[in-house]
Amino acid sequence: MITADGASGPVFHGGAPVWQAGRFTLDLARPLVMGIVNVTPDSFSDGGRYTEADAARRHCEALLEQGAQILDIGGESTRPGAVAPTADEECARVLPAVRHAVTLGVPVSVDTSEPLVMRAALDAGADIVNDVRSLRRPGALALLAAHGSAGVCLMHMRGEPGGMDTQTDYADVVAEVRDWLATRLAEVVAAGVAPRRVVLDPGIGFAKTREQDLELLRRQAELLAAGRPLLAGWSRKRTVGTVTGRPVGERLAGSVAAALLAVQHGARIVRVHDVAATVDALRVWQAVQPASAGNLHASPS
């Protein structure tokens, strides 16, 4: 259930965790599907397809028709070697899509690490900041702490995308990611962001090898000890490609399988490109769960 109720409301709905996300309280009793809207010219999977404002708007609407319950709009590619846009360039990419998406009745996330872009997107009505750098750029944490209701996704990553492949020397990747997320969550909460506003992302593919990604999935339930719900982003990732032997455009089945496994191991949000296929797979999975697990659909309270 997605309830439009602003910042107030109970922390739990029927004993299930919730995510406070701007205009919405998201009941995480059952998994939610976050549809990816890349408005970048150079993303690893679909860069350049939705850079025109009309194309981005149509894509937002198409993802909702396919069953997405959250839209995640991003204007910076984080693939290795990508050139970072300026804040003005990033705003020019994301704001037209954000302004349209916020009229569609679902939570809207902006995938950015740049405080100026965060502010502009929140001012335009965005509900969530999804930051691969976990609000570590100067001014980002203070901005979100002052906002009061926007949702936040904190992701684990070492270094920067351009050099992260050299920073994979973990003694125990699961324990280190878990502890890092718990520490960062505590820091963000201490700065004034309420815990109910935060979800955590282990950062699949970000400063991790294939084996480490798979270990994170295998032992994903251990990450729940950090204290907040998990968002999992496996869609079309390199590890899916190396496991299946498929190029990026042919990773649908592998991506859906990884999303389903992530949910089975405790993730409450899956961030995906292929919404319709993921929704179908999760509906089948949900159909054999206990009735108390709820149904995979979004409906107004």
Image (cartoon, helix red, strand yellow):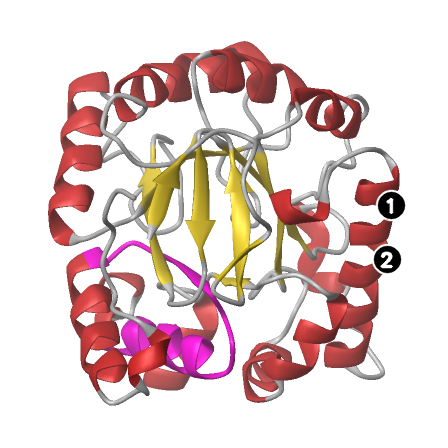
Name above or below for residue 217 compared with residue 197. Answer: below
| Residue stretch rendered in magenta on the structure | 253-275
Near-viewer residue (159 or 24): 24
Q: Tell me what residue is drawn at x 60 percent, y 29 percent.
A: 149
Q: Tell me what residue is drawn at x 73 percent, y 79 percent.
A: 174
- Compute the Cα span from label 1 to label 2: 6 Å
The numbered mark at residue 271 is none
| Residue 46: % across, % down | 29, 45
Identify the secondary structure beneath mark 2. Answer: helix
Task: Place residue 73 in its image quadrant.
Answer: top left
Identify the secondary structure beneath mark 1. Answer: helix
Q: Tag 1: Cα neighbours inside 10 Å, few (<14), some, or many (≥20)?
A: few
Name above or below for residue 33 compared with residue 40. Answer: below
The residue at which mark 1 appears reads as 187
| Residue 43: % across, % down | 40, 42
Please tell me how many numbered marks the rendered image carries: 2
Q: Is residue 105 left or right of residue 134?
A: left
The magenta stretch spans residue 164: no
Q: Tag 2: Cα neighbours inside 10 Å, few (<14), some, or many (≥20)?
A: few
The residue at which mark 2 appears reads as 183
Image quarter of the C terminus: top left
Q: Amino acid at mark 2?
A: Thr
Q: Amino acid at mark 1?
A: Glu
| Residue 78: % across, % down | 54, 44
